[in-house]
Amino acid sequence: MSNSRRDFLRQSALATLAVSLPFSNQLMAMGATAKPFGLQLWSVKEALTKDPKGVLKQLSSFGYKKLESFEGAQGMFWGMKNTEFKKLMNDLGMNLVSSHCDNTKDFERKAAEAGEIGMKYLICAYKGPQKSIDNFIIS
């Protein structure tokens, strides 16, 4: 008996289908209760520096509900006051969960502004070689 790659793939697909059928209702229920997904703004940094409000509106239209910001040249709130940024997020149905920031410069102000709008975390992602990585929980 000779087995071909095509036969192997067909048999594997059928076996996978057969095993998953008893769980199909559970899989569909898990999909219905899935938590909203988010995006790290670093992944759209070039577009964000040109038009922060426009990019955020686009991201909202794509279904993103949670965001993680970072401290760019315009700050964590992209040239807006923290409360203005929060209002924009609310209007778009989004939530700013966290932000990367430089914790060695004006950290108390950054933490106060983040806490004021309900941001949960400030993250110091990199401190250089041989140094620790710290996350700061605001609430």
Image (cartoon, helix red, strand yellow):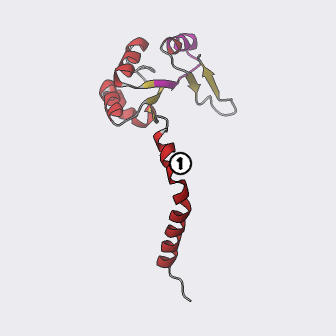
- Asked whether the viewer can see residue 71, the reply is no
Furthest-bottom residue in this view? 1
Which residue is at the front of the view, 103 or 137?
137
Which residue is at the front of the view, 138 or 3?
3
Q: Quadrant of residue 65?
A: top left
Give the amino acid type for the residue marked by disc 1 in the picture: Gln
Q: Quadrant of residue 62?
A: top left
The residue depicted at 37 percent of the width and 34 percent of the height is: 46
The residue depicted at 47 percent of the width and 77 percent of the height is: 6
Q: Is residue 38 magenta?
A: no
- In the image, residue 17 sits, relative to residue 49, either above or below, namely below
Disc 1 crowd, CA 10 A, few/some/many (<14, 14-19, 20+): few
Q: Quadrant of residue 127?
A: top right
SS of the residue at dot 1?
helix
Residue 89 locus on image (x, y percent): 39, 22
Q: Is residue 109 magenta?
A: yes
Residue 1 locus on image (x, y percent): 56, 89
- Asked whether the viewer can see residue 9, the reply is yes
- In the image, residue 85 sits, relative to residue 37, either above or below, namely above
In what quadrant of the picture does the C terminus appear? top right
Q: For this view, does 56 lie left or right of residue 126? A: left
- In the image, residue 73 sits, relative to residue 111, either above or below, namely below
- In the image, residue 13 sits, relative to residue 83, either above or below, namely below
Q: For this view, does 84 lie left or right of residue 70? A: left
Magenta part of the chain: 96-113
Q: Which residue is mark 1?
A: 26
Residue 32 locus on image (x, y percent): 46, 41
Which residue is at the front of the view, 28 or 5?
28
Q: For this view, does 55 lie left or right of residue 122? A: left
Which residue is at the front of the view, 129 or 120?
120
Residue 100 locus on image (x, y percent): 53, 26
